Image (cartoon, rainbow, N blue to C red):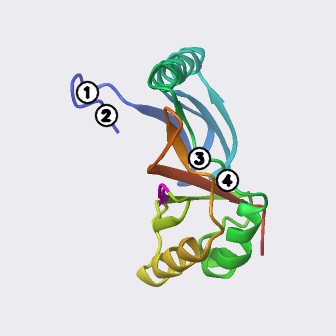
Amino acid sequence: MCNPLDSTPNLKGNYLKGKRTGEWVAGWGTEVYDDDVLVKTIPSKAYLRQTAIMNEAADKVRREANITNAIEPIDFGKFLQQRLASYFKPYFDKNAATEIIIAFTITEQGKLTNGRSVTKVSDSVQEQVARAINAAPYWAPAQRNGKPITQQMTYTLVFDNIR
């Protein structure tokens, strides 16, 4: 892959017998591979600094607007894992934990709607995600100046080496 502005590579690394091996370096950091399996990710100091700056800017905007985020109910992650594990099983990485990102809307009443997987999955799995989100327990809604507001949310489910 190359940067379209100056044709420098965005990602550099080596292949051994057609498989990624050793360090692969990108602008955001380094990934270490062994026989095409990701072993470790090391973010660069510049990436960590930039991320911290962006997070602080977002926090400042929320504080100035007097916005508080929605609060999830206890065991929400467990609820989603129980509802969705069997549908996501074909997408699991057998060698490492698998992260599935779910997006949804939290209404002013705390009801979850518009559920979908950000992680690429089949239409039938998308349908199951939407059903699970619609059946999910209510959250405490986000607030602006003490009044409930609608909030868009992403949630990361982590499945540990499920076989």
According to the picture, the residue beneath numbered tag 1 turns out to be 7
Q: Is residue 77 above or below residue 15?
A: below
Cα gap from disc 2 to disc 4, whole angstroms: 40 Å
Q: In the structure shown, which secondary structural element does the residue marked by tag 2 occupy?
A: loop
Instruction: Select label 4 or label 1 by which is in front.
Output: 4
Q: Are marks 4 and 3 in contact (CB under 8 Å)?
A: yes
Query: Split into 4 quadrants, where in the image is the N terminus?
Result: top left
The correct choice, above or below, for 138 with respect to 135 in the image is above
* Disc on the earlier residue, 3 or 2: 2
Q: Residue at x 69, y 75 (%)?
A: 85
Magenta-highlighted residues: 104-108
Q: Amino acid at mark 4?
A: Glu
Q: Amino acid at mark 2?
A: Cys
- CA distance for labels 2 and 1: 5 Å
Label 4 CA crowd tier, 10 Å (few <14, some 14–19, many 20+): some
Q: Which mark is residue 2?
A: 2
* Residue located beneath label 3 in the image: 70
What kind of element bears circle 3? loop
Residue under numbered circle 4: 72
Q: Which residue type does callout 3 highlight?
A: Ala
- Work out how far the residue at label 1 is from the one at label 3, CA to CA, in angstroms: 43 Å
Task: Report helix, strand or loop for mark 4.
Answer: loop
- Dominant SS type (magenta): strand
Q: Position of residue 93 (x, y in %)?
A: 67, 64
Left/right of residue 64 with respect to residue 71 in the rendered view? left
Evaluate if marks 2 and 1 touch, with contact meaning CB atoms under 8 Å apart.
yes
Looking at the image, tell me whether mark 1 or mark 3 is earlier in sequence order: 1
Farthest residue to the front: give it. Answer: 146
Q: Is residue 27 visible?
A: no
